Image: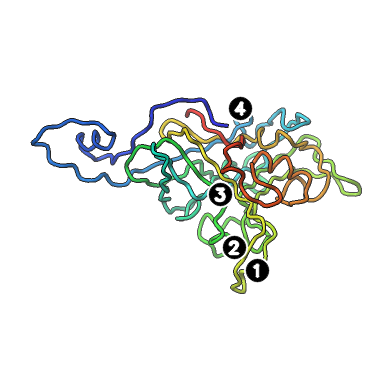
Amino acid sequence: MQHSFHHPRFCLTAAAAALPLLLAACGGSGGSDSTPPATPAGPQAIAIEFTAKAGNLPAKCGTPINGIGTSQATVDLHDLRFYVSAVSLITDKDKTVPVTLDVNDWQTKEVALIDLEDGTGACADAGTPAQNTQIKGTVPAGSYKGLRMTVGVPSSVNHTDYAVAPKPLDVQALAWSWQAGRKFAQIEVNPAGGVARPAPAAAGKTFYVHLGSTGCTGNPVTGETVSCARPDRMDLRFSDFNASAQKVVLDIAQLLKGSDVRQDLGGAVGCMSGATDPECVPIFSALQIDLTTGRSINEGRSQSVFRTEAK
């Protein structure tokens, strides 16, 4: 669901550009016959900010979150991390322009890791104090009005050994057992009273949401090409987004709105992207991924897990 926040279209120009260049890049006019011709503006830095909420309230480690799911459970956040790739801005002419990602501990040229847990409270089980709340990169100077991206790791870099992979693909907690892939998203909560399971299974402590490619064949360790029947990557598209004035919100209340996080009816506890797991039905519906094919539905236009709002 797209936030109703309105803003003028934003124009990106090189910070060191002279005023005539600024006016030209933004579609203005001015100057005189003596004004020398402007040189093309260089790449402009951009930062896309992320935060986590449950409805309108912050969702963070160490603070109980009320009213989650169909049973209106009280939960503690246990983990909240996800990979993002194929980040692009949308111009005022509806053209997509890829963001060139900076390379650092949280980003390669292909993928960024957003880490919204801080290792406190229940997140201490597998989390870390370090967080990353931004995607950083550059785009050509221009006028942009929207944002596209994918929650997931591109296949070309997904199926590798985390132990020798570059940061941030080296995170052991996000290693995925399916042919050495990654968990694209790891969103977990601990409901008060635990998670009831069918007898004779004991109750679980954590309701897991793990998004990742499934139905994979091929062994990357021996050099085989890996092919996955269900890619399970989530597309996002916001037709109205201004990086300087807005942020992207992941709403765990929306993610879990159709789930009873206090009960698991079979398969893995919670949803680990299993095509026959009953807990994955409402989760994948919220993510707008077809559970049978693993394909994103209509570029995620109807999803409500992620939204934009004013900073």
Q: Disc 4 or disc 3, which is closer to the eye?
A: 3
Q: Residue at x 37, y 46 (%)?
A: 139
Task: Please tell me whether mark 4 or mark 2 is closer to you in this view.
Answer: 2
Q: Residue 232 carries which label?
A: none
Label 3 or label 1, whichever lies nearer to me, is 1
- Earlier-in-chain disc, 4 versus 3: 4
Q: Where is residue 184 in the image (x, y as percent from the top left)?
A: 61, 51
Element class at badge 3: strand
Of callouts 2 and 1, the N-terminal one? 2
> What amino acid type is highlighted by mark number 2?
His
Mark 3 or mark 1, earlier in chain:
3
Q: Are the two marked residues, 2 and 1, in contact with CB atoms closer than 8 angstroms?
A: yes
State the residue position of label 3: 83
Task: In this rendered view, identify the residue nearer to me: 231 or 161.
Answer: 231
Marks 3 and 1 close (CB-CB < 8 Å): no
For mark 2, give the secondary structure: loop
Instruction: Name the residue located 62 percent from the left edge and 44 percent from the top edge.
Output: 297
How far is disc 4 from disc 3 in space, using C-alphas?
23 Å
Residue that mark 1 sits on:
218
> Which of pointers 3 and 2 lies earlier in the amino acid sequence?
3
Count of numbered labels shown in the rendering = 4
Tell me, for residue 159, which label it has, or none: 2
Residue at x 59%, y 69% (from the top left corner): 225
- Element under label 4? strand
Question: In the rendered image, which residue does mark 4 sit on?
Answer: 57
Secondary structure of the residue carrying numbered label 1: loop
x and y, in percent, of residue 59 in the image: 62, 33
Disc 4 residue type (three-letter): Leu
